[in-house]
């Protein structure tokens, strides 16, 4: 396995700023979600707000990705592309924001309800959010990465859901994807030992139905094989000598 980058105090401070910018954009975009709005309109506002905050999209142009953000509706898991699709009452939309600020990455995602959603879909989304939040305390110096991955999978299965295995979380810093890969499944006591100064983008992708996924003809959008909804939440987390620090908590709406 490639070496996992350890950030210096100065680099961590830059990542805090990038994380705050990403969280601010995400928080604002979440407020746009309502019936009739298009995913393209949400993506366009992301570009506007990134410019206002002095950052730019970490996704636009990455391996030729065409959007400012990833916008994935209902059965779309991740990597959806903003366009002409209009949100309907009862939809869920996963909004994934990555920014570059002063050369450093902030990366975060949430799932937003468009009005009231089906009870089983609401349960999926609330459980996925809770699973992410309960996994973060595993990101401490001295633990194995597999402890965190196993917790996510175990909690998802306990709720009656399945985890996506083809796509995973990752380290982050100067690059959008750094070591280590962070699967949402695994065995406790395995994987690299976590050390203070590592920064991890932890992102459960959990399906209401089966774990199978496929990629649409656009080459990007990942959907569930059975067409059932999927939820996605993500935070970038700093490992310290004490409690983990979440670099992308959503700030108050501004």
Image (cartoon, rainbow, N blue to C red):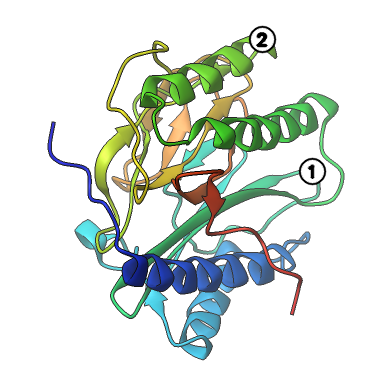
Q: Is residue 250 left or right of residue 95?
A: right
> Is residue 175 depicted above or below 45 in this figure?
above
For the C terminus, the image quarter is: bottom right
Which callout, 1 or 2, points at the residue further toward the start of the chain?
Answer: 1
Identify the residue at horizontal 58%, vertical 58% (top origin).
85
- Label 1 CA crowd tier, 10 Å (few <14, some 14–19, many 20+): some
Q: Which mark is residue 90?
A: 1
Q: Is residue 67 visible?
A: no
Identify the residue at horizontal 41%, vertical 36% (top origin).
141
Q: Which residue is mark 2?
A: 158
Q: Is residue 12 visible?
A: yes
Observer-nearest of 140 and 64: 140
Q: Which mark is residue 41?
A: none
> Where's residue 111, x and y in %?
65, 47
Q: Secondary structure at mark 1?
A: loop
Q: CA distance from mark 1 to mark 2?
A: 25 Å
Observer-nearest of 194 and 128: 194
> Where's residue 139, x and y in %?
48, 36
Observer-nearest of 2 and 123: 2
Q: Secondary structure at mark 2?
A: helix
> Where's residue 253, x and y in %?
76, 73
Residue 15 picture quarter: bottom left
Residue 99 picture quarter: bottom left
> Is residue 45 depicted above or below 141 in this figure?
below
Identify the residue at horizontal 22%, vertical 61% (top origin).
64
């Amino acid at each position: 396995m490639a070496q996992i980058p350890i950030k210096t105090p100065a680099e961590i401070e830059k990542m805090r700023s990038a994380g705050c910018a990403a969280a601010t954009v995400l928080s604002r975009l979440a407020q746009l979600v309502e019936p009739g709005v298009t995913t393209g309109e949400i993506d366009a506002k992301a570009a506007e707000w990134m410019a206002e905050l002095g950052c730019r999209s970490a996704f636009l142009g990455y391996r030729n990705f065409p959007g400012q953000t990833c916008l994935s509706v209902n059965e779309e898991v991740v990597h959806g592309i903003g366009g002409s699709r209009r949100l309907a009452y009862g939809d869920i939309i996963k909004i994934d924001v990555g920014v570059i600020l002063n050369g450093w990455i902030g990366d975060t995602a949430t799932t937003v309800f468009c009005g009231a959603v089906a009870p089983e879909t609401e349960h999926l989304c609330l459980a996925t959010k809770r699973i992410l939040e309960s996994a973060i305390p595993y990101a401490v110096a001295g633990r194995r990465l597999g402890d965190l991955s196993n917790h996510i999978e175990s909690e998802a299965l306990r709720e009656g859901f399945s985890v996506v295995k083809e796509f995973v979380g990752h380290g982050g810093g100067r690059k959008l994807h750094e070591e280590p890969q962070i699967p949402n499944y695994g065995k406790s006591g395995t994987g690299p030992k976590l050390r203070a100064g590592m920064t991890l983008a932890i992102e459960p992708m959990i399906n209401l139905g089966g774990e199978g996924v496929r990629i649409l003809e656009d080459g990007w959008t990942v959907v569930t094989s059975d067409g059932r909804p999927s939820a996605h939440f993500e935070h970038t987390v700093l490992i310290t000598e004490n409690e983990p620090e979440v670099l992308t908590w959503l700030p108050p709406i501004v």
